[in-house]
Amino acid sequence: MREKHMIDIRRFPTRAEMGLAAAADVAAAMRRRLAAQPGLRMIFASAPSQQEMLDALVAEPGVDWRRVTAFHMDEYHTLPADAPQRFGPWLKRVLFDRVPIGTAHLMTPEPDAEACIRDYTRLLAEAPIDFVCLGIGVNGHLAFNDPPFADLADPVDVKIIELDPVCRRQQADDGGFRSIEEVPRTALTLTIPRLLRADRLFCVVPGPAKRDAVRRTLNDPIGTACPATALRTHPACTLYCDVQALPDAA
């Protein structure tokens, strides 16, 4: 794998400016792609780190959302379907209910997680994925591919994983759960190779809690100790950070 990152790095004074710039780039890419082809397929992360970008994306003019097919990238395995912490319903509230989305495919692990995996794998494989809007976890995870068990050459597209304690702590710190004990121990996730097969990646990573993960993403050896280092192998990945997340010497 490459030892020098090819990531296009963008740094902004505030989270709001970061979100506006990322949304403008995503919307511009969507408009260009929709002008050249009948439809567009996208994967979205569901996390507070994406809020500013998604809010700004909803407000972007001239995007024909009716021709967009959307997916999300991970979901808790054991939470009730109506739990407010579920990622699919969160993304529906924040994005899909606010635009005239063509099709939004949400993971539904119950009552049969293995059937969900098969169905979601099939839907993802129906056509290439154009864009992924994602973040990076405090432990360097992509989606729920936590170190050290992430597989950068994973042969499957969707799987059940056990969440790393650092990842579970992040979910509690993000405010969705009152304590780490409430955070589920397992989840469904898209794998790293599945995400990296998309044509273009827009990676939005704000806040001081992500500073070390960003530093490691850009500078550590590519590997499972920091799964986000795999972003450096993608030919079209843009990283958007505020000054609290992006080290001065990237």
Image: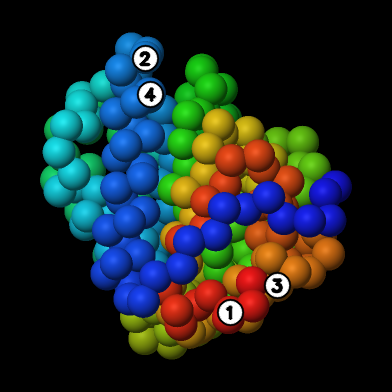
Give the numbered dot on residue 247.
1
Q: Nearer the viewer, residue 214 or 141?
A: 214
Q: Amino acid at mark 4?
A: Arg
Measured as percent of width and height from the top left, residue 226 is found at: 73, 67
**Direction from residue 38 to residue 192 in the image, left or right:** right
- Residue assigned mark 2: 36
Q: Earlier in the sequence, mark 1 or mark 4?
A: 4
Which mark, by number, is residue 33?
4
- Vertical comparison of 249 with 90: above or below: below
Instruction: Find out whether the residues at labels 1 and 2 contact each other: C-beta distance under 8 Å.
Output: no
Q: CA distance from mark 1 to mark 4?
A: 33 Å
Q: Which residue is mark 3?
A: 216
Amino acid of disc 1: Pro
Camera-nearest residue between 41 and 184: 41
- Residue 156, which numbered label? none
In terms of secondary structure, where does tag 2 sit?
Answer: helix
Disc 1 to disc 2, how far (Cα)? 37 Å
Residue placed at 21% from the left, 32% from the top? 63
- Secondary structure under the numbered disc 4 in the rendered image: helix
Secondary structure of the residue carrying tag 1 is loop
Q: Earlier in the sequence, mark 1 or mark 2?
A: 2
Q: Quadrant of residue 174 in the image?
A: bottom left
Measured Cα–Cα span from mark 4 to mark 2: 5 Å
- Please give the name of the residue rendered at 53% of the width and 75% of the height, measured from the top-left corner: 246
Packing grade of label 2 (10 A; few <14, some 14-19, many >=20) is few
Which of label 3 and label 2 is nearer to you?
2
Q: Is residue 157 above or below residue 142?
A: above
